[in-house]
Image (cartoon, rainbow, N blue to C red):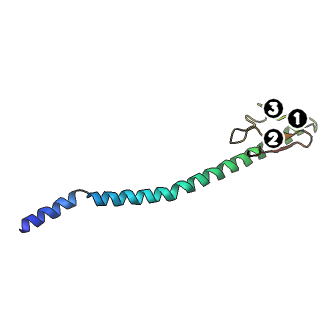
Amino acid sequence: MIKTFHKLILASEKAFTLIEMMIVLFIISILLLIAVPNMTKSNDVVQEKSTEATVQLVQGQVAAYQTNHNGELPDNLEELVPEYVSSITASNGKPLVYNATTGEVRAPADE
């Protein structure tokens, strides 16, 4: 009788039971439900910050163009490529908005 109990105890220690596996999967699914929404929020913040940084960079290059051309502003942002900047698009792929009279660069409006 003792040998039978001993065999049952050893057998149960060698592998997971179905209930233990279901509990582990349940815990993992709860962690995923918590983590995924936070990652999507972070992605939006990163994209916004990237667009802001691109706008500041291009605005600085407009000022550099103005310095090199005796105070004259470029007619459009394409004049800055490739000498001043390599790209004039925001992180979402839309082109930046440029006001040729004031020299102001801004991010495209979300539609």
Which kind of residue does numbered mark 2 sit on? Val
| Distance between mark 1 and mark 2 Cα atoms | 13 Å
Q: Give above or below for 18 relative to 85.
A: below
Which quadrant holds residue 96? top right
Mark 1 or 2: in front is 2
Q: Which is nearer the eye, 77 or 29? A: 29
Looking at the image, residue 86 sits to the left or right of residue 38; the answer is right
Q: Are marks 1 and 2 in contact (CB under 8 Å)?
A: no
Residue 74, horizontal then vertical, whole percent = 88, 35
How packed is label 1: few (under 14 Cα within 10 Å), some, or many (20 or more)? some
Look at 69% across and 38% down and name the residue there.
93
Residue 68, horizontal then vertical, whole percent = 88, 36
Which one is earlier in the sequence, the residue at label 2 or at label 3?
3
Which quadrant holds residue 99? top right
Q: Which mark is residue 78?
A: 3
Q: Give above or below for 2 relative to 77.
A: below
On the image, numbered disc 2 is attached to which residue?
Answer: 97
Which quadrant holds residue 10? bottom left
